[in-house]
């Protein structure tokens, strides 16, 4: 993990801890949004300096969250993972200290009782497994791995042709299926008293985000229903990564309306530090506020 990047939030009695695997990666906004540009980014000064470079490129992180609720230790998404063959060079054969960092943060893999992947893209399922003596084995041997049934119904039809696009199914999903650790759930499944899923289709067909409520406090972990805070200002701009980009826009807009004006702390799965904040609405538009 990048030094000094661990962060914890309290939501009533629930604790959410962030572990960063890739910190503040930069790319042109057009990599994410078809109509993205530095000019668009610069229209929204509140994006600077946390979420944009001075030049107007986007900054995004790859990270996961461990949620502590009573005795439960629930891992939300599992990042990219080491030793992978992936479409993108920078995510191929990574060698990070992710598992050591997780243990150092107080969560050795065997203490995790539940893993929830918001969807089945490679950067959300990677540490489901790790390589031991040349074989992919489940990283969290005592966990139930929860996947949305709808999501799997899509991915199970994906051709397993040895292509690099299908690699994450082979190395990060199939081994936990083979180990009998998977439970397929509905997109509104309740994990425990404080934590439930909400459906957010569009980015992928069975995408979910995570709702946390405890003692009158609320928070949401977004998954990829949005990737960058600029999408609060321009929720209807099509992305390059969503399977049904129009539906993803409708989902995003409904989500923003539902949680606008501080109805829940928004914890953005790809949002750079400080990662969490509130949706504020003024007369003309929405924005993301970290205070
Ligand atoms: Zn992602």
Image (cartoon, rainbow, N blue to C red):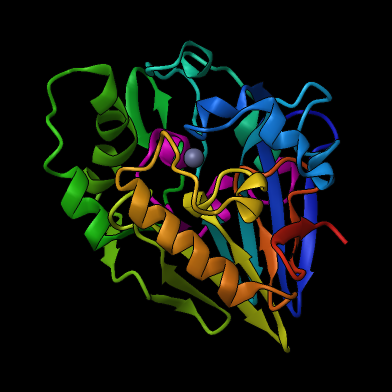
Q: Is residue 66 visible?
A: yes
- Residue range highlighted in magenta: 103-126
Residue 266: x and y in percent read: 67, 63
With 46 as the anchor, is 136 left or right in this view?
left
Residue 232: x and y in percent read: 64, 55
Residue 168: x and y in percent read: 32, 30
State how many labels appear: 0
Q: Residue at x 42, y 52 (%)?
A: 117
With 182 as the anchor, is 33 left or right in this view?
right
* Residue 147, picture quadrant: bottom left
* Residue 189, picture quadrant: bottom left
Residue 107: x and y in percent read: 65, 51
Q: In the figure, 288 relative to 5: above or below?
A: below
Q: Residue at x 29, y 40 (%)?
A: 173
With 102 as the anchor, is 140 left or right in this view?
left
Q: Is residue 76 visible?
A: no
Q: In the figure, 170 relative to 174: above or below?
A: above
């Amino acid at each position: 993990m990048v030094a000094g990047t661990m962060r914890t939030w309290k939501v009533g009695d629930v604790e959410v801890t962030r572990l960063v695997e890739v910190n503040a990666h930069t790319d042109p906004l057009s990599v994410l949004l078809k109509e993205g540009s530095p000019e668009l980014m610069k229209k929204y000064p509140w994006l600077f300096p946390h979420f944009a470079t001075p030049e107007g490129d986007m900054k995004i992180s790859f990270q996961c969250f461990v949620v502590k609720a009573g005795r439960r230790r629930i891992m939300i998404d599992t990042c990219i993972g080491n030793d992978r063959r992936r479409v993108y060079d920078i995510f191929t054969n990574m060698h990070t200290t992710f598992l050591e960092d997780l243990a150092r943060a107080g969560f050795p893999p065997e203490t995790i009782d539940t893993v929830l992947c918001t969807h089945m893209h490679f950067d959300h399922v990677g540490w489901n497994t790790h390589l031991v003596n040349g074989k992919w084995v489940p990283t969290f041997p005592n966990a139930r791995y929860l996947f949305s049934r709808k999501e799997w119904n899509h991915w199970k039809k994906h051709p397993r042709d040895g292509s690099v696009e299908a690699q994450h199914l082979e190395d990060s999903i199939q081994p936990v299926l083979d180990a009998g650790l998977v439970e397929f759930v509905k997109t509104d499944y309740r994990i425990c008293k404080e934590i439930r899923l909400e459906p957010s289709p569009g980015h992928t067909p069975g995408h979910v985000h995570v709702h946390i409520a405890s003692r009158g406090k609320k928070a949401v972990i977004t998954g990829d229903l949005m990737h960058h805070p600029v999408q609060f200002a321009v929720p209807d701009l099509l992305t390059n990564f969503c399977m049904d980009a129009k539906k993803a826009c409708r989902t995003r807009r409904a989500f923003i309306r539902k949680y606008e004006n501080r109805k829940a702390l928004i914890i953005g799965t790809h949002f750079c530090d400080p990662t969490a904040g509130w949706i504020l609405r003024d007369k003309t538009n929405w924005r993301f506020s970290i205070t």
